[in-house]
Image (tube, rainbow, N blue to C red):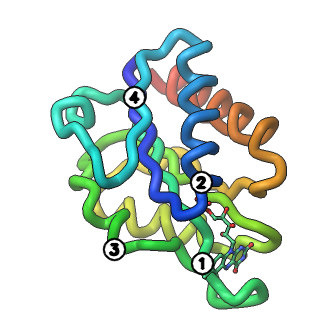
Amino acid sequence: MKVVVIHQSRTGNTRRAAELIGGAAEAAGATVAVRPTTNLDYKELAEADVVFVGTWVDGLILFGHRPGDLGRVKQVPKLWNKRVAAFMTHAVNPGNAADKLAAVLEADGADVVAARSLNRRRLDADAPAFAAEVLASVSAAA
Ligand SMILES: Cc1cc2nc3c(=O)[nH]c(=O)nc-3n(C[C@H](O)[C@H](O)[C@H](O)COP(=O)(O)O)c2cc1C
């Protein structure tokens, strides 16, 4: 299985989540590339079986949650009919930002199989667990 993990990160949490997701996928036997939104490889994306797309939660803690740097995320080539997992990182309250990210990706034709925000303090446990869940659901559907 070919997996690409794309991240948009300002202070490194989402990049770290992406690396943990990539590491878990690799440990499960996948061929993995982890890339920032600024350094994508179109051929690699075209050949991917699953694409993880991640960014950070921007909001006012109690309300107004949305995907951070959405303009950058929207520069990712349209993922027509690709299985895509949306992930985010947050500090305390993600609101419904992960659903909003999923909606943006779906509007670009992605087949979103999961959407989750991960608490930045629990990435070590939660990011690999999310990866395992997504890969299991994709393998079951294949
Ligand atoms: C402008 C701004 C707004 C934020 N709003 C929220 C928020 O509403 N809820 C939350 O849980 N975290 C919020 N955060 C925290 C980030 O989502 C969190 O630190 C995230 O892990 C940063 O990811 P990065 O290190 O990949 O940039 C905010 C951070 C910034 C800079």
Which mark identifies residue 71? 3
Looking at the image, tell me whether mark 2 or mark 3 is earlier in sequence order: 2
Asked which secondary structure carries label 1, the reply is strand
Asked which secondary structure carries label 3, the reply is helix
Q: Position of residue 51 (x, y in %)?
A: 40, 39
Q: CB of mark 3 within 8 Å of CB of mark 1?
A: no
Looking at the image, tell me whether mark 1 or mark 4 is earlier in sequence order: 4
- Point 41% across, 16% down: residue: 31
Identify the residue under disc 1. 58
The residues tagged by marks 3 and 1 sit, at their Cα atoms, a distance apart of 13 Å
> Mark 1, mark 2: which one is toward the viewer?
2
The residues tagged by marks 4 and 3 sit, at their Cα atoms, a distance apart of 22 Å
Q: Where is residue 34 in the image (x, y as percent from the top left)?
A: 43, 35
Q: Is residue 119 left or right of residue 97?
A: right
Q: Which amino acid does label 3 sit on?
A: Gly
Identify the residue under disc 4. 33
Q: Where is residue 3 in the image (x, y as percent from the top left)?
A: 42, 28
Q: What residue type is labelled 2?
A: Gly
Q: CB of mark 2 within 8 Å of CB of mark 4?
A: no
Identify the residue under disc 2. 12
Q: Which amino acid does label 4 sit on?
A: Ala
